Image (tube, rainbow, N blue to C red):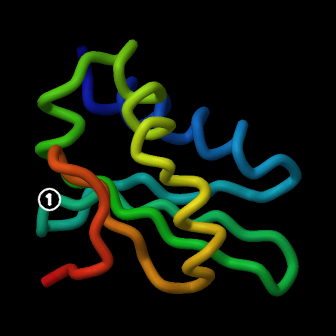
């Protein structure tokens, strides 16, 4: 399955969890991270999705994995602090 389709699955998850918010981004940077910005008014959240996460999971698994990791809850709690999604879970540390 293509990376574009998997990024669309991440976007769909984020849009369903952040109703009324604009979800932008998802393009790959040179560091293997896909960046998503979720914003509405003064509220902005940042999800960083590791390329390895997308490569390791099927299209059907992505939304379920993100729900199991409680990504939306962590994004809402951390406000503007970026949350990184990897194969082992979530992290606030990113180099």
Q: Position of residue 72 (x, y in %)?
A: 59, 54
Residue 49 or 92: which is nearer the viewer? Answer: 92
80 shown above or below 90 = below
Q: Which residue is mark 1?
A: 32
Left or right: residue 60 compared with residue 78? left
Q: Residue 69 location in percent, x, y?
A: 40, 46
Nearest the eye: 15 or 63: 63
Count residues near mark 1 (Cα–Cα under 10 Å), then give few for <14, some for 14-19, many for 20+. few
Q: Is residue 20 above or below residue 12?
A: below
Which residue lies at the image location 27% right of the left edge and 56% below the top edge?
28
Foreground of the two, 18 or 8: 18
Looking at the figure, which quarter contains the N terminus?
top left
Q: Is residue 40 above or below residue 59?
A: below
Q: Residue at x 87, y 52 (%)?
A: 20
Above or below, 72 relative to 29: above
Horizontal and vertical percent position of residue 67: 50, 37
On the image, the x and y values in percent for residue 40 come to 82, 70
Residue depicted at 53% across the width and 65% down the height: 74
* SS assignment at label 1: loop
- Dividing the picture into quadrants, the one containing residue 22 is bottom right
The image quarter containing residue 75 is bottom right
User: In the rendered image, which quarter is residue 33 located in?
Assistant: bottom left
């Amino acid at each position: 399955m293509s990376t574009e389709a998997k990024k669309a699955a991440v976007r769909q998850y984020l849009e369903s969890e952040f109703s009324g918010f604009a979800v932008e981004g998802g393009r790959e940077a040179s560091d293997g991270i896909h960046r998503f910005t979720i914003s509405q008014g003064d509220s902005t959240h940042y999800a960083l999705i590791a390329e390895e996460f997308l490569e390791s999971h099927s299209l059907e698994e992505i939304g379920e994995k993100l729900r199991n990791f409680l990504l939306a809850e962590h994004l809402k709690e951390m406000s503007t602090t970026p949350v990184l999604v990897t194969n082992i879970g979530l992290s606030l540390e990113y180099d």
